[in-house]
Image (cartoon, rainbow, N blue to C red):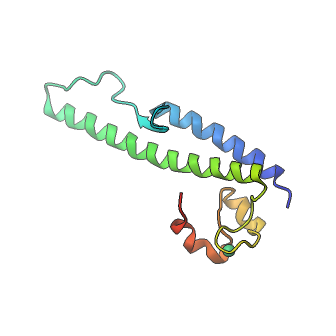
Amino acid sequence: MNSQPYKEIIEQKLTTLTTELNEIGYYEEKNDNWEALPAEDNNEPDADPNINADKVEAWNERRSTLDALEKEYRSYERALQKIEKGNYGICEIAGEPIEEARLKVKPDARTCIAHMEEESNLAL
Ligand SMILES: [Zn+2]
């Protein structure tokens, strides 16, 4: 199959994801992962426990959004690597071609439609 159109979609998606990640977090090179930014203003504990709780909650929310974005980023990064290795669009469960209809909806799909359910069991 021609993976070139998917490559463009994937690269665009990675650019968008990088922008989104940078809005709420920062990349930590030594751990090779993303960390959520602390509160926008400052990270000092506030005298008011309610304000403090709000800050913690905001940070927790940011962290969970960041985790989801990072997961998506890794998935698209893997898809790009597969294009480079020449095994893009091949089901990782049984090695058959992944339906183009599936790749159009989910360019980072790792399995064909028949093996969709098993995708979450694949090693990262
Ligand atoms: Zn399959």
Residue located 49% across and 31% down the image: 29
Quadrant in which the N terminus appears: bottom right
* Outermost residue toward the right in this view: 2
Query: Could you say which quadrant of the image residue 110 lies in?
Result: bottom right
Quarter location, residue 56: top left
Residue 122, percent from left and from top: 55, 65
Ligand 1 quadrant assignment: bottom right
Q: In the displayed structure, does residue 62 sit left or right of residue 21? A: left
Residue 116 higher or lower than 45, as above or below: below
Q: Is residue 114 above or below residue 105?
A: below
Residue located 79% across and 55% down the image: 86
Left or right: where 105 falls relative to 44: right
Q: Nearer the viewer, residue 8 or 88?
A: 88
Question: Residue 54 at what x, y percent from top left?
Answer: 25, 36
Left or right relative to 23: residue 82 = right
Residue 51 position, x and y percent, is 20, 31
Image height of 57 relative to 96, above or below: above
Q: Give the quarter of the image for residue 25.
A: top left
Kindly identify the residue that appears in the image at 69 percent across and 68 percent down.
Answer: 91
Q: Nearer the viewer, residue 114 or 81?
A: 81
Q: Residue at x 86, y 57 (%)?
A: 2
